[in-house]
Every structure is written in structure tokens, then in C-alpha cells.
Image (cartoon, rainbow, N blue to C red):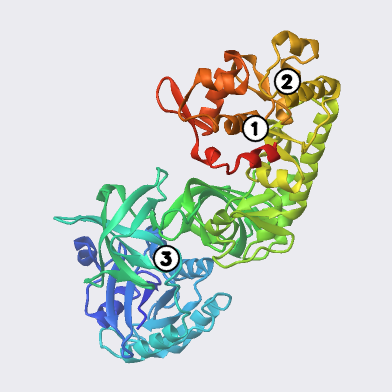
Amino acid sequence: MTTHVVATAGHVDHGKSTLVRALTGMEPDRWAEERRRGLTIDLGFVWTTLPSGREVAFVDVPGHGRFIRNALAGLAAVPVVCFVVAADEGWSAQSSDHRDAIAALGIRHGLIVVTKADRAPELVVATIERARREFADTGLHNAPAVAVSAVQGTGLDQFRQALDGVLDGMPSPDAAGRLRLWVDRSFAVAGAGTVATGTLASGTLTRGDRLMVVGDGREPREVVVRALESRDAHSDTLHPVNRAAINLRGVSAKDVRRGQALVAPDVWLMTATVDVRRIGGAALNGVPAQVTVHVGTAAVPARLRAFDARHARITLDWPLPLIVGDRLLLRDPAHHLVLGGVRVLDPDPQQLARRGAAERRGMELAAMPLEGDVLAKVVDRRAVQVRYLRQIGLVGTDTTPPPEVRELSGWWVHLPAYRQWEGQLRTLVELDAERDQLTPGVSQGAVRDALGASAAPFIDRLVTDAGLEQHDGHIRLPRVRVDLGRAEEGVATLEARLLANPFLAPLAGDLAALGLGLRELAAAERARRVLRLQGGVVLLPSAPELAARVLAQLPQPFTTSQARQALKTSRRVAIPLLEYMDGHGLTRRVDDEHREVGRVERAGVGTGQQARRD
């Protein structure tokens, strides 16, 4: 059966700890000072089994105003609340603080418990009615209410039944979801090492898992789960929702503390800037610029820049693993007041660099749905990795691209932007060719500069879609038979001579007489009209395979002198030609004096294919 975790809430001395002690038979106050003073200072953890067989753990939070930070750490990570109001004292100061926190955190499941009913039975009904009025505008407006006396033991059975009913209505937790466990306690155990505890709200923990400790302003640290416990029982696997005690290898107890999180690696984005929408409390354009942000068990100083009454940008003092939909509680650090709650619309917004950008951003956020706007994110950045969209919570594992978005090798690309890049690339290459027909094309670096960083991952695909080609790091128009402009006549004459005598390479003076300098020959080679070898030797691209066919007729192996004679050429041509053929597998050296033709060429297979390609 699914386990559950419930937090207590309510004013100090209204009987929260006494209630869970009576329900579980366990002591929630862990510190000797708490038991001595009868005052809960920090979070307590106890558990029991309900009549249905359902296992439930309680996180008992302090009710005194001085310890509101500790209380928020307990409430923010738990989906169900047991709100306590004493019959004899009624609604009190911290009752309102905890109500505001519950509303800000968006907690929608729980029950109202009137404690100390034996002391003022005549006030029970009025206390319940007051509590219902206080919760009228919150997620607990329909919460069931029960009256108990933990000292006398009355009403506890009704409480258990009511809690069972609340838990029946809880949505099933996501055991397959990505893991993020907010740490609420850490300590060292002799012989075992570091132990961190927290509420597992989603995902699954397994012994041997590799996790990351994040959220303290330092670099994330990798840890390994050595062992797991829940409710003092060892386990190899824990599913949500559950209290978890995790024995960690790879980190000391002093380096893990409340406010950090254990997360699955590579699936969360650490962010320090988020755009948010108010979901309760004060108007955002009326709150202080300096606030404390509570999320999970973390409490982080932050700066708030309001766009309007409902939307703002929050900049945290250090990054946290946040996604679209996360609820943050804002607190005034100077007056210890809960200001209200906000919901993350964009966990990784663009900078506001231009005049009027803040006003435009406020309007964009006002039109944005609560679940975020994946199309707006893609349009804004023109291209984003799907992995990134999953990290910030905008898409799931099986989400399909929205209209006007194309998936390319793990990226979502805005189609209008892609078409614009394609047109820009084509124009860039065509203008380059018009300026100089002997150009090697536009370098990839120049293309990246012209199209921008967003287009960089797709240059190869853009080249194909634009009907262009790449050669030696340059992008150019397709060159089947390129007119070489002023060099065309000289290259054509050279080709005719080499067709008649394939291995009679022209001397430097012959090339100069044809008007073929280094630049013209380089352009001809890029157009696959000639092949340049070491020592200034120029032949046709078909020469190496033609030579392989001739040399295959010689007794194998053969010497350089025998090759020169068979090809009817000079050592000036034969040596660089044979070295080229060695490098391309057409021949291979047997020893310092001898070579042999590759087996493929001797078999007469494949030698015509390259010539046809050339």
C-alpha cells in the first residue's frame, strides 16, 4: 500500500506534538531542550499505521514565531497538512502565519483538528467555524474537521478515519518521475558515515544510485547511496511518498545540510533567476525588493523585480534545481512575515537587456499559461535542446513538438528561423561566388558568425537543405563542372595535355605560360579538375587509379624505377605519385625498395568508380 507523509501546522502550545505522540506512541521532540521546555524547536519525525493498513509518517513542525523558518522547511516538502487549533485558545498569531504559508505553498490536502476539546467543549464548534473562514480562500477550504483530546484519548479514532479519507483522495505519486529530495536533516553515524533525511515526493530511490548534492552555492557533488531506511526499516528501494534516511558515500555530514537537495544527475537545471506569477498574498509590486525565498527545505536570500502586481523576476543568491510549476514562498526577512506565494513560469528567462524589455516581459508573462509556454521558449531562442526543455519541466519524455517546430537530432527548432537561416546561408554563398569565381567558398567560421550561435548545430543540415556543398572547411555552390573564369582556358588546355599523356606533368614554366599560378591551381583542385602532389606536380584526379591499373600488370613487388618506366614518366613525377598512392591504399611498401599494388586494384575491382566520380 502507498505510504504518505503528513505535516502538522498551527500555533505554539496548541498540542501538535501531543497529538502525534498520542497517535504514534513515539516522541517527536528529538532534543533534550525541547522536552525540558515543552516547546518544539525543530522538525520531529514519527510514524504509525492507520486502521486501513496505510502507513503514514508525521513531520511535526514548531509553532513558535521565532522558529517559522524551521516550520516552513517542514511544510514546504510535504503534500498533506494536519492543521491544529486548540479549543481553549482559538485562532492565534501563528495560526495565521501557518495558514498563510499553507496558502502560499499551494497545499490542497489536509484536515483541521481542534485539540484540547476536553478543556472547552462548548467552543469546539465555534473554533471549527473560525478555522473554515480563515481557510476560505485556500486549498483547505473543504478540509474535514475533527475534535480530539490527546490527553484523554477521545476523538483519535475519528481523526484516524478522517485522515484515511483525506489520503484516499490523494493523487498517486509519480514513482517514475525524476528525483529531487530536499534534505531536512543530516548527521554522521559511527561505522556508516553520512546520513541525510527528507521526504521522497517523486521518483524512486535505489541502493547504489548515483546522485548529486546541490543547492548550497558550491559546485554540485556526486554521492552514492550506500543504504536506505524508512521508518527504522532497511530497504533496497523506496517509492514516493515516503520518509527516507539515506546513507551517502562521497560526502561528509558537515557538507550536507538542510536546504540542499539530492537530485538525479543530468536531469535538473540549476538556476538562480526565475520569472514567476503570484498565487496568493501581497501584490508583487508592493513587496520589498529583498526577500527570502522558501522552496522545499531551502531558504535563500533573493532580489525581487516586479513587472506588475502579479508577475516578477526573482534572482536568488545561489542556484537551485527548479522547474516550471514549482511553488515558492516569499518571506520578508526584516519583519519575519509571510508575503505570499508565487509559481514559477520560466525557470531560465533571457536577460532584460534593452529599454522597455521589462514591460514587454510582464505582458508576455501575463499571457503565459501556468504550465509554461514551450513554443514561446523555442521561438525566443530559435533552437533549444529537448534535454534542456525536460530539465526545466516544459516537456515530458513523450511530448511531441508543437506546430511550427521541427525536431533535428535532439533539438527543437523554430521552422521560420530555420528557413531564415537557410536563405541567409544561400545568399551568403552566392554573393561570395559572385565576387570571385576562384573563391574556395565561405568558411564555416564565417557562416557561424553570420547566422549566429543558435544556428551552429545545424550547419551541416542547412548546407544540404540549401543545395550547397562543403569542401575543406568551406561551404560553396555545387561544383560539377565549375567555370573557373580567367583560369578556365588554361585549365582546359592542361586537361587536354594530360588526357593525352596522363603522367607527363607540366613544369613550373609550362604552368606559368598557361596563366596557372598557385591561386588558379587551388581553385581548379577545389573544382576537382586537377590533382596537386608534392613538389609542384600537377596531374588529373584520375591519375592515381590509372597508374594502379598500369602497375598491376608488373611482376609484384616492383621498384620505383620499374614503376617510372611503366608509367613513362620521370622520378620527379613518379616519387610523389607513388607516395600519394601509398597514402590512399592503392599501393603499399613491402620494404625500402619495393612496393606492390593493392589486391583490389590487381583484381580489377573498383578502379573505375573513383575515375567516374572525378
Front one among 287 and 267: 267
Q: Amino acid at mark 3?
A: Ala
From this view, report whether residue 11 is shown above or below residue 597: below
On the image, the x and y values in percent for residue 44 come to: 29, 67
Quarter holding the N terminus is: bottom left
From this view, report whether residue 302 is shown above or below residue 85: above
Question: Residue 368 shows which numbered tag?
Answer: none
Q: CA distance from mark 3 to mark 1?
A: 53 Å
From this view, report whether residue 367 is shown above or below residue 80: above
User: What residue sits right under mark 3 in the picture?
Assistant: 77
User: What residue sits right under mark 1 in the picture?
Assistant: 473
Quarter holding the C terminus is: top right
On the image, the x and y values in percent for residue 4 come to: 37, 77
Front one among 512 and 134: 512
Mark 3 and mark 2 in contact (Cβ < 8 Å)?
no
Residue 323 at least partly seen: no
Front one among 416 and 362: 416
Q: CA distance from mark 2 to mark 3?
A: 71 Å
Q: Is residue 543 left or right of residue 260?
A: right
Element under label 3? loop
Q: Amino acid at mark 2?
A: Leu
Q: Going by the picture, which residue comes out furthest to the left?
A: 191
Q: Residue at x 42, y 72 (%)?
A: 175
Element under label 1? loop
Q: Which of marks 1 and 2 precedes in the sequence?
A: 1
Q: CA distance from mark 2 to mark 1?
A: 18 Å
Q: Quadrant of residue 172?
A: bottom left
Q: Going by the picture, which residue comes out furthest to the top?
A: 509
User: What residue sits right under mark 2 in the picture?
Assistant: 521
